[in-house]
Amino acid sequence: MDNTTQFTSLMENATLARAERMRMLPMRRRTNRSRGEHLAGKGGTSTEFNDYRDYVAGDDMRYVDWNIFSRLNRPYVKQYRHEEEMHVVILVDASASMQFGDKFTRARQLAACFAVMGLMNIEKVSVFACQHATQTPLILAPCTGRISMKRIFKFLEEIPPGGDFPIEKAVESVLIQHRGRGIAVLLSDFLTFGALERPMNMLFSAGLEVFAIQLLSGIELNPDLTGDLRFVDAETGHTLDVSSVGDLLGFYHEHLNGLQEHLSTLCRQRSGRFICLDSSQPLEEILFDVLKRKGWVQ
Amino acid sequence: MTLPGFSALINAWWFLLLIPLVIFYFLKLRRPRVEIPSLALWRQVITDQRVNSPFQKFRRNLLLLLQILLLCALVIGAMQPYLYSNARHVQNLPVMIDTSASMAALDAPGGRSRLVEAKEKIGRLIDDLLPDQQICLISVNSSARRLTDFTNNKRLLRETLARLEPSHVPSRLVDGFRLTQALSRGNSIESAILMSDGNVPQDIEFELPFKLNFQKLKPGGANVGIVDFNARRSRTGWEVFARIEGAPGTKVQAEYELRQNGQVIKSELISIEGPRINPEKAVVEGEGDKKADQPTGERLMFKISTDTAAMLELRLKPDGFDALDVDNVAYLSLPRPRQLEVYCPEEMTSFRNALAIVPGLNIYPGSDATPPAVDLKFAEGPIATGPESRVNLNVGFIPDDLAALVELESGLAEIVDWQRTSPLLQHVQLLDVQIGDQPKLAKGISERDFEAAGYEILAESRTGPLILERPGDGRLDLCMLFHPDRSSLVFRVGFPILVQNVTQIAFSRAHLLDAKAIPTGEIPARKLEPEKEYHVSGPHGYAETGTSDKHGYLMGMNAPFVGQYEINSPETERIGASLVSSQETSLVSVEKLIFPENVTVTAGEAEVKGDQPLWGWFAFAGLALLVVEWWFFQKKPAGVPG
């Protein structure tokens, strides 16, 4: 690492610089009415030409293409694309289960990267951190512009770890406060006893395209356990006696794959995306390789 | 498939320990705590139907499985399981071990003796001994000796077995059977095992009251040995004869040495060939009837001239492998040549006249003073009168112990039957001899009463016995109840023959005519000083003390080993004991034993297999399970943090 001052402790300046030049690629246009950088499907007043149509009474005369009128002697109106703003909602699961391995760190780094991409593309960015089920999520109010970058970094850096907020409840809690269409980036391990259909439906209904990123540590992806063990839930403190764990790892992997398949299906059916990442993977590899190849960012 | 049996089935109650074992296992299972992000997935796993299949549950509880197996192994071991053998389960098993000389035979150069092989087989039998079974070890050679009581103490049995050594005496199985029969009075005996090389007499005069398992060992290898060693008095000295035989199939050269009082007097190399073996019929030529017709081996003859007593030692040195070495030496004691001392009262004129023509006699009373002991004594009255003698002929007098059985009356009597093969009456014609004394049996007396009194009837008339003999205590008493002077016997040619027969008996008893090698087993009675303690020492540190009887005869002294024995009389007397057994040297084994009433027992070479105890295997399995369980319990689960 060079001696230059780090802009944030979450990532190196070089990584940040590369992230600033990237942008998210939603599968659908989910934009707000407010004017923004994203072209809307309908006609607008941007500088980007879209099409011609016949002039009808009442149209603004300024949009009549006079060159065509002079050649064809018929008035045609030039249409332009409408550019709208996209709201990027980033939900960081900060519960105790995220404290294993580098899950929480990686979640904050990815949140910072997505936020930077949003800010640099003149999107509205809001960040939610969910900890305790009994408390409301920590909220970073929607902000935009490069000027908000420092604020977002500070917010992410100061998220206290711990808590028992399940992801499905966290989504519901976020949607109570959120307004606007766009992208919802969910950074969680998705290890919850609750059903995930409902939060996914709510996100879809709210006009948010889901970017679900499941972050799992080594003990979750490839648990190397044998014998008779007493598992203790890091969030609830509940215990579970499991005998001959080594013999059950096959079943464990089957259920883990089933969970990932389920999440992937839920997202795909709602025009969203899902990816499972190993939290031990370097951020640069995730950001500039995995997500790029998957077409999440460019 | 034979199911195993259990000696201590009552210990099956210990299986009830499985209940608390399972309960305590689930109550007290020590599980390491592992903190994980969420139980969500693991809860799904353990509620999976496949995971909850009985087999999977069993696999998950491997520790419990190990503990159950450990307990089962220990309990089954405590139940003393055993596998049935083909042999019937017996509780008291006498094991007769043939320890005769042939059991020392080796099977090959540097090989093992028959007794060592027998010990190994019996050792395995002892190892398989069940708690309710007892073994009694019996050593059988020329006599039988109980080595242990009926016991299941394996250590004692093994130690006793280890101490067992082959003897230097021939086989005589009947004593072993009698001893086993005697043991059956105190213990129920259904069957017995005889462990032998088969080099035993085939015909056994014993009615088997139990089932006999005759375990035959493989016979020894090539062997040669001295089977006979004797001497006959000649005019010039002694003619010594020796016979050397070989085991079937043996063909070897050997050098013999003849020593007289320790000095080698002759040495020669001879070739010895044993009976040939017919490989097709596997029959040994020279056995049975052919044995007499086709004698094999080598006969040696030597002439010895000596005026004093001499000890001859014949030693054989085979040039090659020899299975048995105790038969390679034989001893022969030659007595000092002398006249036969005969005491015949002067009034017995007819006898003195008959004795006068017999050469080699010193007759008393005569010119010399009568010695206190003679070799032959004639008497007309009680035997006690006159000098002491080993052979006594009493005429015209009824001994005191026969007085209640028979009495003499006046009247003519004729001999109607006599034992023509008796040494006394050989070549003596007693037919038509008129006797003036008529014996009359007491009322109710029969021949059996004379036998009970120790007498054997040699000649008898219609009314009672006339000539009897009573052997015993190294003596021979011949009784002619009638007086020859009152019969026509003195006028018959048979009379001098009868007198000469008596002198021949006396010559033989005094060892003046011939000498034979003394076989191992027992030292013949020796005439020494009366009622005196004597110490007998022999080879291999053998020592024994005995007391002579009132007549001066030392009897019942053992000679268990081949070698020279010393009796510490005022003049130390040396006696040699030799194996000299054609049967032991031949190493020929019999395939079956024949008992009275056509009862035969066929030998089997297959090892006797008792019920196979299995508790050791279960104990070992329990130990292995304990080690596995300990390892499994102590093993730190992989991946457990900290």
Image (cartoon, coloured by chain):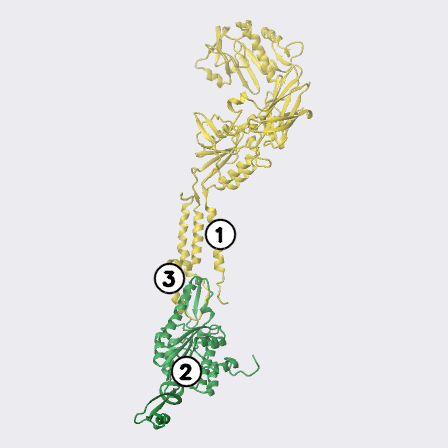
Tell me the colour chain A is drawn in.
green
Is disc 1 placed on a helix, strand or loop? helix
Q: Position of residue B514 (x, y in %)?
A: 61, 18
Label 1 to label 2, Cα distance in Å? 67 Å
Left or right relative to B389: residue A116: left
Residue type at the position of mark 3 = Arg
Q: Which residue is mark 2?
A: A88
Between residue B153 and residue B268, name the one nearer to us.
B268
Label 2 to label 3, Cα distance in Å? 43 Å
Q: Are marks 2 and 3 on the same chain?
A: no
Asked whether residue B33 is in view, the answer is: yes
The quadrant holding residue B114 is: top right
**Disc assigned to residue B403:** none
Residue type at the position of mark 1 = Leu
Chain displayed in yellow: B
Using a 10 Å C-alpha cutoff, classify the residue at mark 3 as few (fewer than 14 neighbours), some (14 to 19) or many (20 or more): few
Residue type at the position of mark 2 = Val
Q: Position of residue B141 (x, y in %)?
A: 54, 30
Q: Which residue is mark 3?
A: B50
Q: Which residue is mark 1?
A: B623
Q: Judge depth for marks 2 and 3 and give the one in front.
A: 2
